[in-house]
């Protein structure tokens, strides 16, 4: 019987046997596997069983679904695969496969992440529109770029395989994107989006 072992920071928090044809995973309480965390979308992913095979499908979640470090839309799961959603790791265990096969899967899948994902997203920058630094452009060359003033408001812009997302890290004053307040749940950024953070206006520019 296939099962999913959910852990965070190496601590197992739940084990779920996959007994149904369709098992849903998300933050909302009606999911079969509930992960109550802001990094997890309300309806994040679904596992579909077909005979002895289990397919994992991302349901257009905000932060994406990763298998062995690689972003996926839909993928057949192998014994020992690690599904990553936010800070949670979910190990897929299917009886009948050897330990050796399990290790090989993780190493092989992880090795090509850099090469396959890098070209999919164009370069981008944040252009400061107001204040003392108006006109300055900050290139988004790192995977995660933090902007703002510590103690006031800090946001993080993360480069993902499908594009860039922004989320609140800390601060009582919430930043806005096109006038809409940000929360800790990541929001996709598009070329020309206006970000206001700690009284400074910035524009997201994708090249």
Image: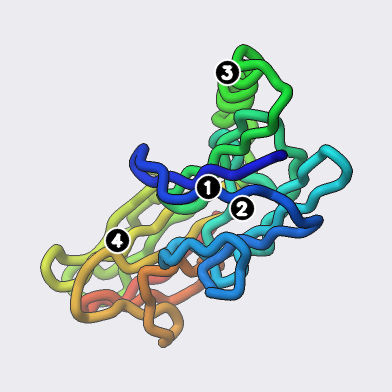
Which numbered disc flags the more N-terminal residue, 4 or 2?
4
Q: Earlier in the sequence, mark 1 or mark 2?
A: 1
Q: Nearer the viewer, mark 4 or mark 3?
A: 3
Q: Earlier in the sequence, mark 1 or mark 3?
A: 1
Residue located beneath label 2 in the image: 162
Q: Position of residue 123 (x, y in %)?
A: 51, 48
Label 3 sits on a secondary structure element that is helix
Residue nearest the viewer, comparing 125 with 101: 101
Please tell me whether mark 4 sits on a helix, a strand or a loop: loop
In which quarter of the view is residue 21 placed? Answer: bottom right
Residue 67 located left or right of residue 36: right
Instruction: Name the residue tied to disc 4.
Output: 136
Residue nearer the viewer, 4 or 75: 4
**For residue 15, which numbered disc appears in the image?**
1
Q: Marks 4 and 3, Cα distance to the nearest angstrom?
A: 47 Å
**Mark 2 and mark 3: Cα distance apart in space:** 27 Å
Disc 1 versus disc 2: nearer the observer: 1
Q: Residue at x 61, y 29 (%)?
A: 80
Is 76 left or right of 16, judged from the image as shown? Answer: right
| In front of the other: 119 or 134 | 119
Instruction: Locate residue 167: give its quadrant.
Output: bottom left
Disc with the residue nearer the chain's start (2 vs 3):
3
Extreme residue in the top direction: 100
Q: Nearer the viewer, residue 166 or 23?
A: 23
Give the labeled residue for mark 3: 103
Q: Residues within 10 Å of mark 1 (few under 14, many from 20)?
A: some
Q: Distance of mark 1 from mark 4, alpha carbons? A: 50 Å
Asked whether the residues under the numbered discs 2 and 3 touch, taking CB atoms below 8 Å apart as contact, a structural biologist would say no
């Amino acid at each position: 019987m296939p099962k999913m072992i959910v852990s965070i920071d190496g601590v197992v928090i739940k084990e779920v046997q996959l007994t149904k044809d369709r098992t849903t995973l998300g933050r909302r309480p009606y999911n079969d596997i509930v992960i109550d965390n802001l990094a997890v979308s309300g309806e994040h992913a679904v596992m579909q069983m077909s005979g002895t095979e289990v397919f994992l499908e991302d349901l257009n979640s905000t932060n994406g679904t990763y298998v062995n470090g690689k972003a996926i839309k839909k993928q057949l799961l192998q014994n020992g695969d690690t599904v990553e959603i936010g800070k949670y790791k979910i190990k897929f265990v299917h009886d009948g496969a050897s330990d050796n096969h399990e290790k090989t899967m993780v190493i092989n899948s992880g090795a090509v992440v850099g090469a396959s994902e890098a070209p999919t997203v164009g370069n981008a920058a944040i252009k400061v529109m107001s204040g003392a630094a108006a006109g300055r452009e900050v290139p988004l060359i790192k995977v995660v770029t933090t902007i703002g003033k510590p103690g006031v408001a800090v946001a993080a812009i993360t480069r993902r395989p499908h594009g860039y997302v922004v989320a609140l890290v800390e601060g009582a004053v919430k930043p806005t994107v096109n006038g809409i307040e940000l929360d800790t749940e990541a929001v996709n950024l598009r070329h020309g989006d206006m970000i206001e953070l700690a009284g400074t206006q910035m524009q997201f520019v994708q090249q």
